[in-house]
Image: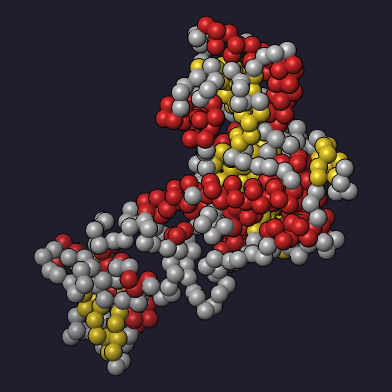
Amino acid sequence: MTTNKQKGWKEIPKGGLILEAGNSEKYETGSWRSLRPVRDENKCTNCLICWVYCPDSSIIVKDGKIKKIDYDHCKGCGICAAECPVNAITMVDESEFRNEKTEKGGKK
Amino acid sequence: MSKNTVAITGNDAAAYAIKQINPDVMAAYPITPQTALVQKFSEYVADGLVKTEFVTVESEHSAMSACVGAAAAGGRVMTATAANGLALMFEIVYIAASSKLPIVMPVVNRALSGPINIHCDHSDSMAARDSGWLQLYSENAQEAYDNTIQAIRIAENMKVRLPVMVMYDGFITSHGIEMVDFLDDEVVHNFVGDYQPNNPLLDPEKPLTYGPLDLYDYYFEHKRQQAEDIKNSKPIILDVAKEFEKISGRPYGLFESYQLEDAETAIVVLSSTAGTTKEVVDEMRAKGKKVGLLKPRVFRPFPYQEIAKALSHLKAVAILDRSDSFGAFGGPLFTEIRSAMMEFGKIPENIDIIYGLGGRDINEQDIEGVYNQLDAIAKSGKVKERIQYLGVRE
Ligand code: SF4
Ligand code: SF4
């Protein structure tokens, strides 16, 4: 998708270079997802195994506990659901959430 | 004659230019007819005459990949290739240009397979004409030497920052021995100057990314930038030529005109065939025939306006293509020039002569025949056959 907010050819670095480090967060890969990991807080033991395995750093932890899943970047690979020892994570078809808005616009 | 005049092959002349440029990195794979260049340069490396890191690679795909890596890291980088070697590095040739890496590469023109052939035509570099590299064509060993040195300054100019190919004809120029005037080492060092890296990867203070994924949202903008940058290289090429003339006494432009100003008919041809054509022009001029020659030096960016203007006074012009563009309306040089004439000039009658494929010789009688045909076209105003093949058996 292209929008009017995106920069024109005179305004962007040449050669396709990205001139700043640590910028991958700005690329919201959440829009690629077709299955969404949904965590059952009642089942979850906060063992943090999903946090270790998530390839996209999308399991957000605060004070040693799972705070949330970052749906703006989670690609829906299902690794967390497969690794969870207590089956607290279920992969749900994104079509179920069609009308829901995420914080920053990941998959709607 | 100055003390720097030597009898030397085109390959050795180009290798000597690279020795004097003394790049940080050279990654190259030997391929006929470029082999002698790489061999000579590796001697300079072995003898400690250059500080260049010479990367021996297992293929041209790796050669250009190593060049891209070294140039992105922040080094002055060169390589050289020909024909199938250029074809094998093709993917990375595009990446070098789109990443804006000022790599300089002599391409010793040779026919692309198949059937396999090792002799001269321009099908290799013409296939790369849309890769985003600048292209300079050289008539002889002297021009191969001079263009290689100038290419460094053009490529590295901050307004250009694009890779440059320097072409010369396989075997005819690469292996033929000619008189070449070399500049002093010191003069070349001063002319090319110290390398100024632009966004080097090896700068820990400024971490950055080369070659990220670029989809429908920004790829087009980056291509638009490339179109602009290569267009803007034209005045830089001329500035560099002016400076080069000061140190060498040898003038260069976007193209060379030979007896063109008052000519009624002319031939347009690249590289070594232009040398043969000059002889024919001299002989025919001595007999009172008003014939001329235009030899393009810069093919990318194509000086369409300037060439169309320089040809506009002619009655008829033959454009000689040493490569075909199968299924197109003529070879690459013809289609460019005919299209430019439509836009910018009065249009002289024009024909395309495809010749010399796979090293098929073209001699003075052949060229005189082309001028005679142009004369008949100029008189009758009629072109019997627009696209012709010269020197092929029926
Ligand atoms: S589905 Fe994959 S990307 Fe998303 S949170 Fe689980 S492991 Fe991470
Ligand atoms: S792996 Fe399962 S139990 Fe462990 S923290 Fe993640 S969701 Fe909770």
Give the quadrant of the N terminus of chain B. top right
Q: Residue at x 54, y 29 (%)?
A: B310
Q: Quadrant of residue B123?
A: top right
Task: Judge by depth and name the residue closer to the eye, B292 or B361.
Answer: B292
- Camera-side residue: B174 or B28? B174
Give how far across and how far down residue B297 sits, in percent.
62, 38
Looking at the rendered image, the quarter that the C terminus of chain B falls into is top right
Q: Quadrant of residue B126?
A: top right
In the image, residue A9 sits, relative to residue B361, either above or below, namely below
Q: Position of residue B212 (x, y in %)?
A: 44, 62
Within the image, what quadrant is residue B176 found in?
top right
Q: How is the image coloured?
A: secondary structure
Residue B171: percent from left, percent from top: 76, 34
Q: Is residue A94 left or right of residue B290?
A: left
Q: Is residue B319 visible?
A: yes
Residue B203 picture location, percent across and down: 55, 74
**Closer-to-camera residue (A55/A11):** A11
**At x 70% / y 58%, what residue is drawn?**
B191
Q: Is residue B30 left or right of residue A73?
A: right
Residue pictured at 75% horizontal, 41% vertical: B142
Q: Is residue A87 above or below residue B45?
A: below
**As drawn, which residue projects farthest toward the front?**
B262
Q: Quick one: which residue is furthest to the top in this view?
A: B380
Residue appearing at x 27%, y 86% in the figure: A66
When the figure is inspected, residue B66 is found, relative to residue A41, above or below; the finding is above
Could you tell me if residue B361 is visible in this image?
no
Outermost left residue? A99
